Image (tube, rainbow, N blue to C red):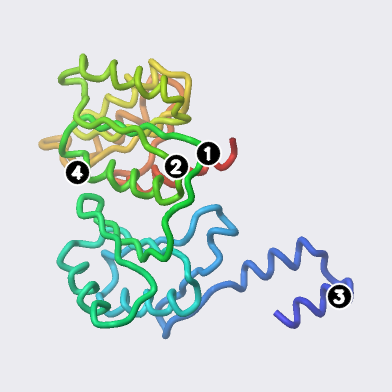
Amino acid sequence: MKELLKKLVEGKITLEQCETLLKAKNIEEIGDNIKLDLKRKGRTGFPEAIFAESKSNEDLIRIINSHIENLEENLIITRLAINRFETIEKHFSNKKNNFKLDYNKKARILIIRFKNPEKKEYKIGILTAGTSDIPIAEEARVIIEEEGHETIFSYDVGVAGIHRLFPQISKMIEEDVKTIIVCAGMEGTLPSVVAGLVDIPVIGVPTSIGYGVGAGGKVALYAMLQSCAPGIAVVNIDNGFGAGVFALSILNNL
């Protein structure tokens, strides 16, 4: 940092170059296998989230400890099974903490919470084709609400009973949602139907719900990518987190 500031004072780099280089330096290394990006929100508009599935409980505890030592900001941990949350909860239960552990069982998201989100002005709609798609939708909902935006959601309104869909979309338009996230497995047609009815962006989230040729969500993914309705962006299979962050990116540029 001193070297960069010296170059700035000497006129060897511009203020903008100095800012960019400082952002690049804001990586906290934990041991020899973990790098925590402390300044991601300033650089990308959304803070770093920790993907739990590929990490041990010990790694997660080390990450949490490093985070709370460096920043008093909320930390998001995704895809955390409830039994693993209980282990982490037990670890911190006997300590004096200035944060709370906020866990959403359906979304499998843990938030190390120092403060509640500041309320913001925009709303986002979330729909699921079936009840089985709810965990992925909940992942998106938690991410959006953590940034302070409101969600208007309705679940189990897929094409198998399409009459259920229209009142929900009408409500979302009345609430002035800026985009709609649509989670669907099986044949994955719901995002196309929604995109044919609204004039706002639709984010399709294929889920791994299905069987036979639809097993694993690839049929739903291909159907959304091949949609004849314009205005659809598609994230990866079961990527509720990515859908939530993409929706926030849209709001950040309004």
Q: Which amino acid type is shown beneath numbered disc 4? A: Gly
Separation of residues labelled 2 and 1 (CA atoms): 9 Å
Which residue is the site of mark 3?
Answer: 9
Q: Is 193 located above or below residue 14 in the figure?
A: above
Q: Which amino acid type is shown beneath numbered disc 2? A: His
Q: Is 174 located above or below residue 217 in the figure?
A: above
Q: Residue 81, percent across and down? A: 19, 62
Which residue is the site of mark 4?
Answer: 216
Q: Residues within 10 Å of mark 1 (few under 14, many from 20)?
A: some
Q: Residue at x 33, y 81 (%)?
A: 96
Q: Please state which of the two labelled residues, at mark 1 or mark 4, is closer to the viewer.
A: 1
Separation of residues labelled 4 and 3 (CA atoms): 56 Å
Q: Which amino acid type is shown beneath numbered disc 1? A: Leu
Separation of residues labelled 3 and 2 (CA atoms): 41 Å
Looking at the picture, tell me which residue is in the foreground, 141 or 4: 141
Q: Residue at x 22, y 29 (%)?
A: 129
Q: Residue at x 41, y 20 (%)?
A: 174
Q: Residue 60, percent across and down? A: 31, 74
Which residue is the site of mark 2?
Answer: 149
Q: Secondary structure at mark 1?
A: helix
